[in-house]
Image (spheres, coloured by chain):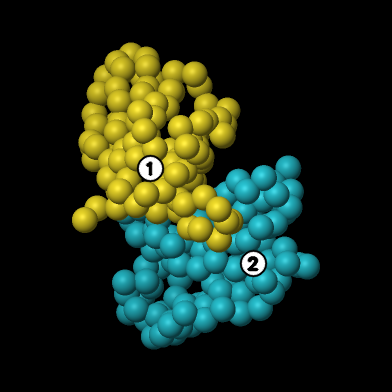
Chain colours: A yellow, B cyan
Amino acid sequence: DTAVSQTPKYLVTQMGNDKSIKCEQNLGHDTMYWYKQDSKKFLKIMFSYNNKELIINETVPNRFSPKSPDKAHLNLHINSLELGDSAVYFCASRKSGGPYNEQFFGPGTRLTVL
Amino acid sequence: GQNIDQPTEMTATEGAIVQINCTYQTSGFNGLFWYQQHAGEAPTFLSYNVLDGLEEKGRFSSFLSRSKGYSYLLLKELQMKDSASYLCAVVDSNYQLIWGAGTKLIIKP
């Protein structure tokens, strides 16, 4: 009964490749996020989608593109992978309507770029 | 700019009490969250404060002072399983969540 799921859990790839990470939530939430957590453990928000509309787009390279086919899914596509993209990527979701609604996180995808 | 400060690392003894502080400077304030993150796992929700004062939830309590831009997470009767990182996050005036870098808590027997 997973609330927020991500695939794959581990991803090892070569520089220059293109890869995608999938995220799905079954909580009925209408806002989803992608975070990057680097080796220093700092959580940096990358994107947020609310009802299929992008509402936050932080200063991330345009090699990263979020894609939301419906409000239960927010996938992350990365082009031309670089060494610095190695990190753990977390998907999260929350119910909009109040700042008190917490975010629920997926288990994370550990990306290693060689 | 927006800033959230937490100690990088703290060490405490099993059975003791520890207080993890968080100070913030943000554009507006709509509440403060504490999350727990065990190594290799996802962050999980602990608490949300929007009014001044102490909120108690079992062994964990969270305190907020909006005038001082300050919060703390209090963990009592520490157990080994409490070894984790504790993340402070503030909801700003745009309802964006601003995250601190987290405090790694090490529990020793």
Dot 1, how many residues are within 10 Å of its Cα: few (below 14), some (14-19), or many (20+)?
many
In the image, is A84 to the left or to the right of B52?
left
Evaluate whether residue B5 shows in this view. Answer: no
**Residue sitting at 33 percent across and 14 percent down?**
A16
Residue B105: x %, y % from top left:
44, 66
Residue at horizontal 69%, vertical 74%? B52
Checking the image for residue B50, the label placed there is: 2
Left or right? Give the position of A89 relative to B18: left
- The label on residue A18 is none
In the image, taking residue A2 as reference, residue A78 lies left or right, namely right
Q: x%, y% of residue B44?
A: 39, 60
In-front residue for pair B39/A23: A23
x, y (%) of residue A80? 37, 15
Query: In the rendered image, which residue does mark 1 sit on?
Result: A90
Circles 2 and 1, Cβ within 8 Å, touching? The answer is no
Give the residue at x 21% y 56%.
Answer: A1
Chain of the residue that carries numbered disc 1 in the rendered image: A
Type of the residue with mark 2 = Val
- Number of callouts: 2
Q: Secondary structure at mark 2?
A: loop
Residue name at image x 47 percent, y 79 percent? B57
